[in-house]
Amino acid sequence: MHFPAYPAAFSRSLSMGLALGVVLVSGCSRCDVPVQHVDRAGAMEETVAQLAISGMMCEIACVSKVRKELYDLPGVTRADIQFDADRKVDTALVVFDPKVVSPETLIATVEEIGDGLYDVETAEVVHYAPESSR
């Protein structure tokens, strides 16, 4: 059977699309983290996931790794982590485009770091929208 030759750029695009599809379809590996959705008025339209993460022990390695992995996801525009060495659970605030990446993918990404080194305890997604002026 003969397959038509495609330009290299098309092949790379296809490969990237398939890889992204696998990430988006894979979702949360355990899917036992309930995601609570909340709508609020805000200065601008954006969606923010607040993830409560346990298992981070230091700011240099742990926090940096979690932040990097979240930033590497398509659709994530900001990932800030509120870390305190004295707490067992720290908070990641992730601004993302829900049309590109799901909250379940954010959770799965964190939980897959280091073969399960970190656990997402809770997840709340806040959808901010400006109030309409009347």
Image (spheres, rainbow, N blue to C red):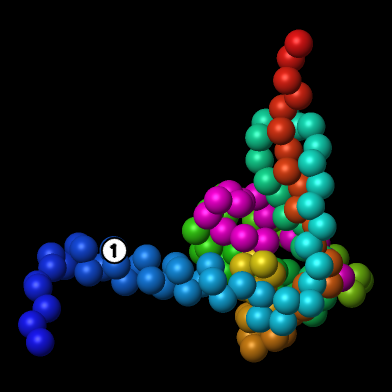
Q: Is residue 85 in view from this perspective?
A: no
54 drawn magenta: no
- Residues 117 and 57: in front is 117
Image quadrant of residue 52?
bottom right
Would you call the spot at circle 1 few (<14 residues within 10 Å), some (14-19), or many (20 or more)? Answer: few
Q: Which residue is drawn at 81% across and 37% down?
A: 40
Position of the C terminus, as image quadrant, is: top right
Q: Can residue 12 be seen in this view?
A: yes
Give x and y (percent) for residue 29: 66, 81
In the rendered view, tell whether residue 82 sits above or below residue 18: above
Which sits in the foreground, 111 or 84?
111
Q: Give the range drawn in magenta.
A: 89-103
Picture residue at 9% right of the left edge, 73% below the top: 4
In the figure, is residue 89 to the left or right of 59? right
Q: Mark 1 points at which residue?
A: 13
Residue type, mark 1 in image = Ser
Within the image, what quadrant is residue 103 found in? bottom right
Dot 1 lies on which element?
A: helix
Residue at 81%, 47% in the rendered image: 38
Image location (x, y in percent) of residue 74: 50, 58
**Residue placed at 79% from the left, 72% from the top?**
33
Measured as percent of width and height from the top left, residue 50 is found at 77, 57
Q: In which quarter of the image is residue 66?
A: bottom right
Q: Where is residue 43 in the image (x, y as percent from the top left)?
A: 72, 28
Specify the quadrant that holds the N terminus.
Answer: bottom left
